[in-house]
Every structure is written in C-alpha cells, then in structure tokens.
Image (cartoon, coloured by chain):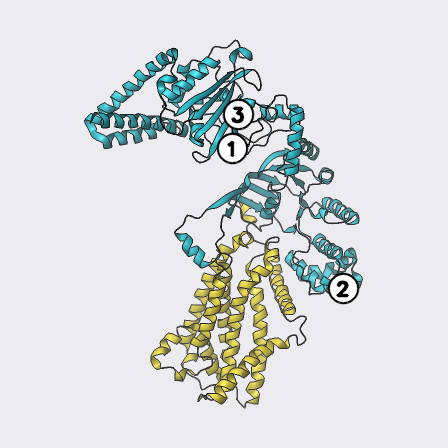
Chain colours: A yellow, B cyan
Amino acid sequence: MSSYTESCKRASPAVRKNYVFLTLVMAVTDFKIKYDNSALGYLWSLLKPLLMFGTLYLVFSVFIRWDVENYKLYLLLGIILWNFLSEVTLNSMVLLEGKASILKKVYFPRWIIVIASSLTSLLTLLLNMVVFFIFFVFSGAHFQKSSWLLIVYLAELYVLVVGLALLLCALYPKFRDIHHIWEVFVQLGFWATPIIYPIAIVPAKFHKLIFLNPVARIIQGCRQALIGPGGEFMAFTNHVIIISAAACLFVVGLGMFNKLSRSFAEDL
Amino acid sequence: MIALEGINKIFRLPHDRKHTLRQRFVSIFQKSTYEELYALRDINLKVSRGEFLGIIGKNGSGKSTLLKLVAKVLEPTSGTICVDGNVAPFLELGVGFQGDLTVKDNISLYGALLGMSRREIDQKYDWIIDFSGLERFVDAKLKNLSSGMQVRLGFSITVSVESPILLVDEVLAVGDIDFQQKCYDSFEDFKKAGRTILFVSHDLAAVERFCDRVILLENGHIIKEGPAPEVSEFYRKVPISNNITEKKQMESEQKLTMPFPESALAHKYCVGKGLEIGGSIFNPFGLNTLNVDITDSMDTVFKQEEIRQCGRALKVDIVASGDDIPLPDESQDFIVSSHVIEHFTNPIKALIEWDRLIKPGGIIFMIVPHKERTFDKERENTPLKHIIQDFKNGIPLPNNELVGHEHVWITETFVELIQYMINVLEMKWQIVEVQDIDDKAGNGFTVVIRKLSLHTPDKSTYIQKSTYQESLSYQNELEATRRELQLIYNSHGWKLLKFYYKLRDKMLPNNTKRRAAAKFCWKTLNRIISFFSRSG
C-alpha cells in the first residue's frame, strides 16, 4: 500500500506534457476570445498602448518639454512594459471568477490558468514590441551592441510579474479587497516609476527610493540597453538585484498559490 | 485502482462570509461563527481496476463530494486518497465550453481540460465529430448550436478520453431517450474495455444494470455496501428523505400504520421544540422534536423492527449517546423519551444531562415500562442503591446499541429515584405528574418532571417516608466524604485540596467516569464552601 501511495502521488511525465498543451490551448483561447467580435480584432492590443502613448506624448512633448533624447521611444517603451505588468496582475484576479465553473468541476493544476493568462499578455507585449521597433527604425535610432540585453530584461520582468500574479490570484478568493487595493497600487506605481518623466528631474535623494522598485530598474535598464546612452542599469549588480527580487516574489507567490489554491473550489 | 482511507470532508459554512479586508479586520475582534457541515464522514473505500461502482443516496448525502474528492477538485479535510491513473470527470458536460469559439476550437479546449494531448485530440477529432453528428457545424460558433448539440459534443469528447478511470455524475438526467441509449451503449463499451467507473445516479434501474457493487450514502456515511440488487432494494425500502413533500407523505402514512396512539399527556406538557431520545416511527409523539440516537445505522434490532412494522424508520437527527448530547445548556423546551431510560446503564447521569439541556421551566417527559406489565415480570426490582452506586462509579454507556433492559422499575421505585435526585443531588425539579398506565403504549407509566425556574423547591413537600430513609443512608455516606475532605482541608489547605481533585480526576480510568466523579466532587465541594461560609 505504501509504495502504491508513493507511486500515485506524482503525475506521470505524459500527464505533465499534457499540462503544457493545456496551458497553450488556454492561452490561445483567451487571446481569441479577448478580441473576438470586435471590428478591429487584434489591432486593439496594439491600439491601446499607442493611444495612451499618443496622449502622454502630446502632453509631455508639446505642452511640457522634457530634455530627453528620443523621448518618444523612451515613453513608449515604459508604457508598454508597465501595461504588461498591470494587465497580467489585474487579470490574474478577475480570471478566477471567470473560470470558477471549470475549477469546481475539473481538476488540473491551478497555476495553469495564471500562466496561460500571462502568456496571452506576453503575446500582446511582443506584438507591442513590434510596434515599438517600427517606431524605433523610423525615428532613426540604431541598435547598439547591448540591445540583446532587452531579452534578459523581459525574461526578468516576466518572472517577476508571474510571481506577483500568482500571489494576488492566491489571495483573491479569501480577500476580495485585494483587487481594489492592487488597482490603486498600479496607479501609484505608474507615477512612482520614471515612465513618463526622465529620472533626471527627480532630486537625487529620491533615486534610491525609486529604484527600490525592481520594475523601475527593469524599465530603466531596457532604455539604456536599447536607446542608450548606456549606464548603471545595465550593470551586473542591477541584474542581481532584479533577479533576486523576481525570484523571491516568484517563490513566495508560488508557495502561497500552492497552499491556497487547494480550496479554490470551495471559496469561489 | 482507487483507495480512500478515513476520509472526512467538512465544509465550513460561515454565517456571514468575509470577503473584504475591512470585514476581516473587524472580525479579528469578533468570534467568527460558522457551521460545520460534515459532507463525508470516515469513508473507507477501495475500488479495484475494472470495477463498475454505483453510488446512490438521497440529495445532499455526499455523493458528488465523493466524486469531486476522487477527481481532486476538492481536498479532504482528513484522510488519504489514492488514485492510480488519469481521471476523466463526467461531472458536468461541456463545463469549459466557450460559446464564442468554433466547435473545432472547443474540442481542443475541452479535450485539453480533460487531460488529452494534442496528438490524441488530432487522432480522435474525426471520431468525435462523427459521434456527435456535427459535421456540418465544425466551423460554427458553439453558442449558435442548440443545447442538445452542445451536450452531445461534450459527451462525445468525454467518451473519447482514454483515461482508465471515469467519474459519472448523473449525466443521464439531461439527455433525451436516444442520448441515454447512447450513454448506456458507451457504458457497455467501457465495461468491456475494463475501465474503472464510479457512477452516481438516482436511476436505480441503470445502477442495477451496470454496477458490480453499490454503496449507499446517507449523511456522509456509507450505510450499506454490496451487490447492486441488494443495496438498491435496501434503499427502496428505506426512503429516508429530507424532502418536505415526502416527509408530509410519510407523516400521513405514519398515522395509518402506527400501532401506538399519540400521548395526550405529552401534548399537554411538551410545548415548543425539544428532543426525543431514541424515537421510533411506530411510537410517535407528533411533537416538534429532533431524534437523538446512539447510532444512525439502520441495522440495529430496533430500527429493523421499525422497518418491519412500518416499512421505514424514523430519521436520526443527532447521533449521540443519550447521556452526552452535544447541544448547549438550556437549549430545549422539553425532552421526551419513551421506553428508553430503562436501557441506560447510568440513568442518573442521563437525567442530569437532560436537565442540563432544558430551559428553566422545561419538561422531562418519560414513559417507562412497568415491570408487571412487560416481559420483565420475573425480574427483581432494581434497588435504588444499585443505580446510585453505578452513578458514583460512573458506569459509562456502552457504545453499541442498547438491547436489554438494564433496570426494572415499577412506578414507586422510579419516583423514588427522581426524589433521590431532587433531595440528594439537589436537582431543581418538581414532579408534576405521574400517570400509572401511560396513555401511549399502555404497558408502562409516565413521569413528568418540570425543571424549576427559580429556587430550590421546598423539599419536604416531595419526600415520602420510605425514600427519606433510603436517602438518609446516602446522606450519611456523603457526610463521610465531607469529613474526609475537611480533614485534608484542615491539614493542607485549599490549594492542596484542588490538587487532590485534579489528581483524582487524572487517576480515574476513563473520560465518562472522570466527568461524573468531578461533577460529584464539585457538588460536595460547593457544599463544603457553603458550610464553611455559613459557620464563618
């Protein structure tokens, strides 16, 4: 009996492979449903950040002027990355309600729904990056040697954001307030992170405070890697800080999720 | 193979659900209240490979919870579950369907949800389309299909999953006759293919047709297990239901078949809500009561007799030993028992427990068989002394059913017992009525006790001579204990006395005994305190 108990505790490799397939199917399904029945379809995922970018660009480039080289690219990159964060984390909570009927009837590892939705958003992020690169080329900027670091930053951002999403998703069924709290937090974060304003206008004594936020470090790093002119945020220590923060969040998020997701079927 | 060991599943139903942080915050300072609902209790079950197991029982008996535990959707509160192999749940057809996607996309999605791989879905795709008869609608959006088509699609996909274990939860209820036939055909195929199936259904004919073995669930217990015909026959015979219309029907039938009339005396005294200890359907009181019994098994001699006489048994609402009932103090208006107290090994303890449960002014209504009018004719009257001795020794109630009459009474000796309790144990009672030859079964007598609401009654009113002498000897005994305690107190002081009691409690062998002894000691202690405070 005991060996039998051991043997049936773990899913077989074949089953685990099917989970990967399920994750992909769910991600694609989410993406299809999101833009279904709308005239512009997938274009909306491009239009949304572009419209926001347009508004902010108008305000901060025409009315108020920052003295930043390639401000357009600087702004667009920041918005795209921040949008990714806010979309994944906010979606992770709404998701559960939408999937409640499945969660109550069928078993699959619950993290699949969070990962699937994050993949959907990742797809949007990548499409947005395409738009960004079109701008990039038209504005006459050039790729630098360090541009490949963008991929590293995106990977770091993804881990960090998924960790956050798991944590929020796990807590949501027990404390519904967290959705509203997080909405406010995202708004605050948007302004507390140098997205629309250059870091140079912030008094130096606040820099430490601002860069406590690993997302600010990622965004700043991406900009320095892509647009230049290089700087401290491409340094190895920066990566160490970001990766440790992301890893911490991910471990805590996954741990909480594993613990709390067991009762999802009852709490929802 | 599926193995469940010692499974308990408790649902906590909070009285006011807290979803927000503020509610949480405020509630930190409040005691959170919830009801615990035992969905499953101590389930032990093994299903071997290739077995077709039926699960029957009324609504809310825990059938679906059991399936969900096996499907891993729910976690057990305690116990271990072992499931060897993939599980395909038929819990609800098409539960993950997305109306905005095409039939084709939905097949991928639903298949993946049920654990199929991409290759499997590709292989099965044509078969699924064919089986569901939806060739023309492959690229149509699912929401534009009729609900019947959607169910067919769901069923086709589920059937095509090649998992060794299938969980089927009343899917047959939704379909038309053709669909049901299709289901049955598939079941035959599954059976031939040697897949393990757990089948929940109210359709006893289907259960008997397919299942090798059937379990009957009632209030989260497996109350019967065995071959299909046997269990379903048992289930048919004992239609225990909380359904209101059925209950009403049962009540009206009761009136036709019950051998004993309702007691007018009981209706005179028992007002409000109360408990009936060891109630039965052929001896009904027609009062607003919950039925307390030591077991809710239907296999006991008494329940079988009930079933034999009336075709069904009275539902047991609270499973508890009659002298240890898990309800709050002073929560009942009355307690009724008929032909029960004589089965108790320790009637004094039971009476004290009942006294605890009723409100001041409440009623304990007992019908006790009279020795001369029953098969106990030849036996000796139980002397009061024995009963008191049993109480002092804390004889516990046995855990199984109580068959024989532990004590034999005539009206006088029983009244004597009550008077002993009033006089010596200082129960705040009054005997309000004694009816020799009760107006119900006719072979006993009725004693009605009222719990007094205010003061200790004037004892002298109730004491008869014989009882007085009887109790006097016990007064002497009590006096001896008192002296012993006083000795300890004088030499070691108060703290030591407490310690002495603790020690004595610990040394007593079992729980029931310990409690009885402790209660007795504290009563004595109280007396000493009052004695000293008076003299001081």
Which amino acid type is marked by label 1?
Gly
Between circles 2 and 3, the one closer to the viewer is 3
The residue to which callout 3 is attached is: B268
The residue shown at (53%, 18%) is: B404
Drawn side of residue A8 relative to residue B192, left or right: left
Q: Quickly name the residue at label 2.
A: B138
Badge 1 local density, few (<14 within 10 Å), some, or many (20+)? Answer: few
Q: Earlier in the sequence, mark 2 or mark 1?
A: 2
Disc 2/disc 3 C-alpha distance (Å): 73 Å
Q: Is residue B242 above or below residue B339?
A: below
The chain ID associated with circle 3 is B
Q: CA distance from mark 2 to mark 1?
A: 64 Å
Q: Is residue B349 left or right of residue B370?
A: left
Q: Position of residue B232 (x, y in %)?
A: 68, 34
Image location (x, y in percent) of residue B28: 40, 53
Q: Is residue B34 above or below residue B120?
A: above
Residue at the spot x=20%, y=28% of the render? B492
Q: Nearer the viewer, residue B483 or B452?
A: B452
Q: Given contact means CB atoms under 8 Å apart, are the residues at marks 1 and 3 in contact?
A: no
Q: Amino acid at mark 3?
A: Lys
The residue to which callout 1 is attached is B272
Observer able to see residue A163: no
Q: How many marks?
A: 3
Q: Residues within 10 Å of mark 2 (few under 14, many from 20)?
A: some
Q: Earlier in the sequence, mark 2 or mark 3?
A: 2
Disc 3: CA contacts within 10 A as few (<14), some (14-19) or many (>=20): few
Q: Position of residue B270 (x, y in %)?
A: 51, 28
Q: Are marks 1 and 3 on the same chain?
A: yes
- Closest to the observer, B438 or A157: B438
